[in-house]
Amino acid sequence: MAKYIFVTGGVTSSLGKGIIAASLAKLLQSRGLKVTIQKFDPYINVDPGTLNPYEHGECYVTEDGAETDLDLGHYERFLSTFTTQANNVTTGRIYQTVINKEREGAYLGKTVQVVPHITDEIKRRMLLLGQSGDYDIVITEIGGTVGDIESLPFIEAVRQLQWEMEDEDFLVVHLTLIPYLKAAKELKTKPTQHSVKLMSENGVHPDIIVCRTERSLTAELRKKIALFCNVKTEAVIEAMDASSIYEVPLKMLQEGLDTIVLKKLHINGYSAPQLGKWKEFLDKVKNPVSKVNIGLIGKYIELQDAYKSILEAFVHAGAVNRCKVNIVNIHSEFITDANVHEKLGGLDGLLVAPGFGIRGVEGKIIAVKFARENRLPFFGICLGMQMAVIEFARNVLGLSDAHSTEMDVNTTNPVIDLMEGQKKITAKGGTMRLGSYPCEIKENSLAHAVYGTTEITERHRHRWEFNNSYLPQFENAGMLASGKNPATGLVEIVELKDHPFFIGVQYHPELKSTVENPQPVFTAFIKASKEFSEKKNLSNPVLQSEMIQTV
């Protein structure tokens, strides 16, 4: 029977519940336990698929096609195991299920209420993964902050489970903030005390308190927190700010978070943590031997979480290449023919990011043209690949009005068009081409060199596709369709024959990049950018002189 750990948050949002949950899961997994993590979000949207990236960051897509919270990306990157639809549940999905059951007459005419009907459905979902028999421990992250109106049904469900289950099968970890007041020159524990008090008033008492802090906690402060929050001193865990999220598991190991969890859950006979690969990766991240400047051309660069998986994939790829990847955020809406050299001239590689809608599209096309003409390593993802197709059609094939019907329904050259299966769909939520699909790669192509195989699977999230009626023109002019879906012929990968590194993919490769399995296209792209940088520096006498002096 699985054991259950619940991670809640207090004082303020964005403290890092997802990272703490993922770090704890990694430590337990490294000891030989089978662990999974799930996220319960309090918002009423059924899923994040229709949310603006400015609202909620990126929408993370699982293998089975679920549009989920970005924290599931952290779970997969830390554990190197897939999540599913069952790993992310929202208030909207809970209420949708209960209302559908009421319409079907499942409640036999009873008055449907938050307690017990909503809380019963929450509890059912909380226990679902643990009942599969696949896991020893299920960690559940409760979104939001204790005290939020939206979170109350979830906290109540946790209270009921705490009452129903045996003590050794249930544990609550509460993440809170210990702020440092510069004027007083001291850390303050009162916000944490109030947070725990509020939880206790709702009937849930934490077993472990993880304290997010800028300054180290003294033994005296730990005792004070333990005393006023009614936990053992050893259950007060310090979570200092870290330079990388990948340091957090090691910091939690030093604090003994996994040890106290195993003790409280009465789990015996576990092995010592095996974190050799993790430490090796972290060493490479901290000690690079080179640096590249990568331009991230996007529409949502004001919020870094909008491209979270891409940024983390760059960290993984940088470690493989022992290279520091410096991301230069460039808003596509402000790229013009007049300033493109100024904005992109100092880059070693260019990634055009995914997105939706017409805003910023022309800037992306100009950026692609710059990379193609200047032989700058280029990588386009989803909409980025489509922009590469449009740019090539306009400036190489001479189809001046070439466009995507997403942006221009009246174009006479729709080189990117709405998929046939999408033309009659009107509902927006969960209706795109989602999840993992196979791709066959041509031998002797750049894509084949990157992946080292002719058969891959990658995750998708799109409605528009390459218009295959134009494919002969593209291939005759030098843009190859090096990867296709074997069932439909949908073009998954395009590349240029006469360019050192130019590749666009319809799928989202960033979603499968993990610490232990860095994504191949990102790794190859950084390698190409590193080589471009080295050649550029060697061809510049001033830079070469500076390099010699440095050595």
Image: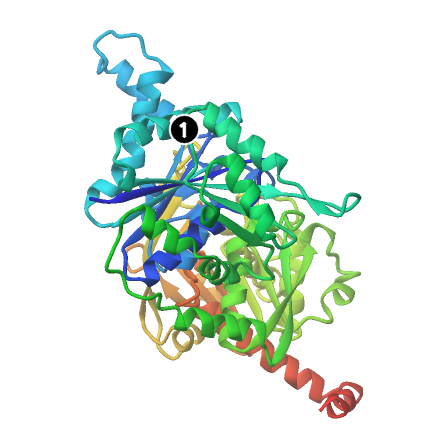
* Model colouring: rainbow
Give the mark count.
1
545 and 319: which is toward the camera: 319
The residue shown at (38%, 45%) is: 433
Which corner quadrant of the image does residue 181 belong to?
Answer: top right
> Can you see residue 83?
no
- Determine whether, in the image, residue 73 is placed left or right of residue 404: left
182 and 67: which is toward the camera: 182
356 and 399: which is toward the camera: 356
Residue 119 location, x and y as percent?
Answer: 34, 23
The residue shown at (39%, 25%) is: 156
- Determine whether, in the image, residue 74 is placed left or right of residue 111: right
Compared with residue 408, is residue 400 higher up or lower down, i.e. above or below? below
Compared with residue 510, is residue 118 higher up or lower down, i.e. above or below? above
Q: Which residue is mark 1?
A: 154
Quadrant of the snapshot with the C terminus: bottom right
Classed neighbour count for the residue bearing mark 1: other residues with Cα under 10 Å, few (<14), some (14–19), many (≥20): many
Residue 281 location, x and y as percent?
Answer: 47, 72
> Can you see residue 529?
yes
The residue shown at (56%, 59%) is: 311
- Determine whether, in the image, residue 151 is placed left or right of residue 299: left
- Secondary structure of the residue carrying numbered label 1: helix
What amino acid type is highlighted by mark number 1? Phe
353 and 172: which is toward the camera: 172
Residue 482 location, x and y as percent?
Answer: 40, 69
Quadrant of the snapshot with the N terminus: top left
Compared with residue 175, is residue 527 higher up or lower down, i.e. above or below? below
Residue 197 location, x and y as percent?
Answer: 52, 29
The residue shown at (46%, 71%) is: 279
Which corner quadrant of the image does residue 228 belong to?
Answer: top right
